Image (cartoon, rainbow, N blue to C red):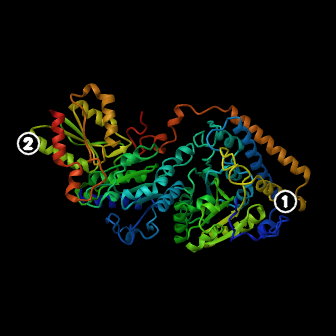
């Protein structure tokens, strides 16, 4: 088992899939010659050449649409968005075309496309570059969304996404790109729709995804050390499909739930998770479900305030104690 | 209402309608008698299918929007009649004519309009969303211009796989002001894709004339020059001219892997959709003029009568058969069953429809 970064894990996933299947093409702004705006695709052009690793113009509606069209004929494009925030100019392609074509054709067509890139706040770049559209996109049947939090999951989920025959949107996090973790040397995938219990506990379930998992794990440590509370942390990994059973099993064990995400609260992923818990495990709950989300405003530029706008360890601890009270 | 000054206009349109100047073009001269009759038959089938749709719509059996192709038949017929095994097409929402041209049956097309499970998309797509990927027909797209990037992707895939093929992406004149179309132009030219953008210019983007919608109107195809692309203008009332000039673009795609923009001047006899009462933006006289003097189906019939390929009797038989086929399709569409409630949640995800030990998805994907 090698210890590699989240960034290297994503790159390894693409390298292995490029080798495995000659229909896989990497495409996006600055992915080839520039080696990737965030260096995720570094070295792939050199290794695989310009047919497999393709620089696009700044033209998201154009090149994402092109990738979707190519996927209908069996190409498996892995498209990089420099930021998921830029997906908004390609929304018609991403939702109406990739998400609807299978349905509108009565199952005659499928779009095996992957769109990946960072979707996070916390980098001091202001509102236009800090969107987290996982809930927006996952609300469309026909679309799949995953949000890896660790190098192991980043590699396994991206490989599964590339092999998947539906549109899969992989939302990464620039703050996690340098995080390191153990990743197996042998081939593996993390199937979509399988959550992971990142920490086992008995008193409180925290459900989180993306970087909120890392924040929640730190909070769980403090809760144990300073408050003697045993916290279980469920990492969704995949938003749609959603592993409802793992969430419910954990809540049935701990009887208390705190939901943490870096999204804004209104119609966030955790709104769906809260509904799930109350509808199928209401009698198991010993306390109301609480949520910790980003403070409900466009992303603020000021770094000191942005750090507070996002869920931080202190806020998670505070809210957990309320659920436990 | 003032018409825009047409600055780039096919020469043949400036002269009175008459025998086609392109009958002797090799691509037409080389057609056998049977091929010519087959082409005429397809045009007549589109005409009668669409006219039958009007009646069903008026009976309240077709919901949603219904954008008819009557008057524009020579565009789909001329272009699609040239295509081979690795040539693909994609279009906007005025998509019935293209579907019938690639060989879709009237039954499946009509049943889709009435929302039946026997429709080409099992009643899930409707009029604007016909698909027949087995016939290289990739839709049928509802959002103006949204199909243009998809088309470049089909051309990209053809080139990636090393096949001698192309993609024709059709759009209306209203689509040329959409950003996605310009992005597709740029990519097709930048990457030398075997792509033909076909602007079916029927003069009106819904109810807005070109003069009111388009800066520097009357030069739609010429915008290709801004991307270094070849372009041409075509009289869309003459199927021979459509074939002759499309063949050049197709050769450019196949042999040089270069894109082309074709602007085909055509005309629709009915409103933008059946929801358009067609009373506010054009004169009845204008429609009458086109119907009587430039009708593409009649023009081709006359052409073939002059060539003695067709006789009046044979033409009558072809039209009668097309009408009878449309009538039968209407009955089929009326009598076919609806999809079921259970069908609503099928065909959303490939992995879900084919779920098994080897598929990559688990968990809940369809929510209550």
Quadrant in the picture for residue A236: top left
Q: What chain letter is assigned to the residue under label 1?
A: B
Residue B9 x %, y %? 71, 69
Q: Quadrant of the C terminus of chain A?
A: top left
Q: Which dot, 1 or 2, sits closer to the camera?
A: 2
Identify the residue under disc 1.
B33
Image-based side of B345 in relation to B308, left or right: left
Res. A203 visible in picture: no
Regarding residue B334, the answer to whether it shows in the image is yes
With respect to residue B144, does B124 lie above or below? above
Residue density around tag 2, few if under 14, some if 14–19, many if 20 or more, within 10 Å:
few
Q: Do circles 1 and 2 both sit on a common chain? A: no
Circle 1 residues within 10 Å: few <14, some 14–19, many ≥20: some
Tell me the CA gap for discs 1 and 2: 91 Å
For disc 2, the marked residue is A226
Q: Nearer the viewer, residue A265 or A261?
A: A265
User: In the depicted view, which residue is nearer to us: B130 or B2?
Assistant: B2
Report the residue at 56% width, 68% height from top: B193
């Amino acid at each position: 088992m090698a210890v590699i970064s989240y960034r290297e894990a994503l790159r390894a996933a693409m390298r292995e899939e490029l080798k495995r299947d000659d229909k896989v093409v990497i495409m996006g702004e600055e992915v080839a010659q520039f080696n990737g705006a965030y260096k995720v695709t570094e070295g792939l052009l050199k290794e695989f050449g310009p047919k497999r690793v393709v620089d696009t113009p700044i033209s998201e509606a154009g090149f994402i649409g092109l990738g979707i069209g190519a996927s209908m004929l069996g190409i498996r494009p892995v498209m990089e968005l420099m930021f998921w925030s830029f997906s908004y100019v390609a929304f018609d392609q991403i939702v109406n075309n990739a998400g609807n074509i299978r349905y509108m054709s009565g199952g005659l067509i499928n779009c095996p496309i992957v769109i990946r890139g960072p979707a996070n706040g916390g980098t001091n770049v202001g509102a236009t570059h800090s969107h987290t559209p996982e809930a927006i996109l996952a609300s469309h049947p026909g679309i799949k969304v995953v949000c890896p939090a660790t190098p192991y999951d980043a590699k396994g989920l991206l490989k599964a996404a590339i092999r998947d025959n539906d549109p899969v949107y992989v939302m990464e996090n620039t703050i996690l790109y340098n995080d390191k973790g153990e990743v197996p040397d042998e081939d593996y995938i993390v199937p979509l729709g399988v959550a992971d219990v990142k920490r086992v506990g008995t008193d409180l379930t925290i459900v989180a995804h993306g970087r909120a998992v890392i924040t929640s794990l730190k909070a769980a440590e403090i809760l144990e050390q300073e408050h003697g509370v045993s916290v279980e942390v469920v990492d969704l990994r995949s938003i749609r499909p959603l592993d409802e059973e793992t969430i419910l099993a954990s809540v049935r064990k701990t009887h208390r739930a705190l939901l943490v995400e870096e999204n804004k609260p209104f119609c966030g992923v955790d709104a769906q998770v809260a509904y799930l818990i109350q509808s199928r495990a209401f009698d198991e709950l010993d306390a109301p479900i609480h949520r910790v989300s980003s403070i409900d405003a466009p992303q603020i530029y000021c770094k000191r305030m942005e750090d507070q706008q996002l869920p931080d360890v202190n806020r998670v601890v505070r809210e957990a104690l309320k659920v436990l009270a | 209402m003032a018409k825009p000054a047409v600055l780039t206009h096919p020469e043949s349109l400036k002269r009175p309608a008459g025998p086609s100047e392109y009958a002797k073009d090799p691509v037409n001269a080389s057609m056998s008698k049977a091929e010519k009759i087959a082409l005429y038959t397809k045009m007549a089938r589109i005409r009668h299918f669409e006219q039958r749709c009007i009646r069903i719509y008026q009976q309240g059996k077709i919901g949603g929007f219904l954008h008819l192709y009557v008057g524009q038949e020579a565009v789909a017929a001329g272009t699609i009649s040239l295509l081979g095994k690795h040539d693909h097409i994609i279009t906007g929402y005025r998509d019935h004519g293209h579907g019938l041209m690639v060989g879709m049956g009237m039954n499946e097309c009509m049943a889709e309009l009435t929302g039946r499970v026997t429709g080409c998309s099992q009643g899930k797509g409707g009029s604007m969303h016909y698909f027949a990927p087995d016939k290289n027909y990739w839709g049928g797209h509802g959002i103006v211009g949204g199909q243009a990037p998809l088309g470049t992707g089909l051309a990209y895939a053809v080139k990636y796989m090393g096949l001698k093929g192309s993609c024709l992406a059709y759009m209306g004149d209203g689509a040329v002001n959409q950003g996605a179309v310009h992005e597709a132009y740029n990519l097709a030219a930048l990457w030398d894709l075997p792509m033909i953008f076909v602007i079916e210019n029927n003069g009106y983007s819904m109810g807005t004339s070109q003069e009111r919608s388009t800066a520097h109107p009357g030069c739609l195809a010429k915008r290709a020059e801004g991307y270094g692309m070849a372009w041409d203008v075509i009289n869309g009332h003459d199927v021979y001219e459509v074939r002759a000039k499309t063949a050049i673009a197709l050769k450019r795609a196949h042999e040089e892997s270069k894109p082309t923009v074709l602007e085909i001047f055509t005309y629709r006899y009915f409103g933008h959709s059946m929801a358009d009462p067609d009373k506010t933006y054009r004169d009845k006289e204008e429609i009458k003029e086109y119907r009587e003097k430039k009708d593409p189906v009649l023009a081709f019939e006359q052409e073939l009568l002059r060539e003695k390929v067709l006789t009046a009797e044979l033409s009558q038989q072809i039209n009668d058969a097309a009408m009878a086929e449309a009538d039968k399709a209407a009955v089929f569409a009326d009598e076919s069953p609806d999809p079921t409630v259970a069908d609503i949640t099928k065909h959303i995800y490939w992995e879900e429809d084919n779920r098994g030990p080897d598929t990559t998805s688990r968990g809940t994907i369809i929510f209550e």
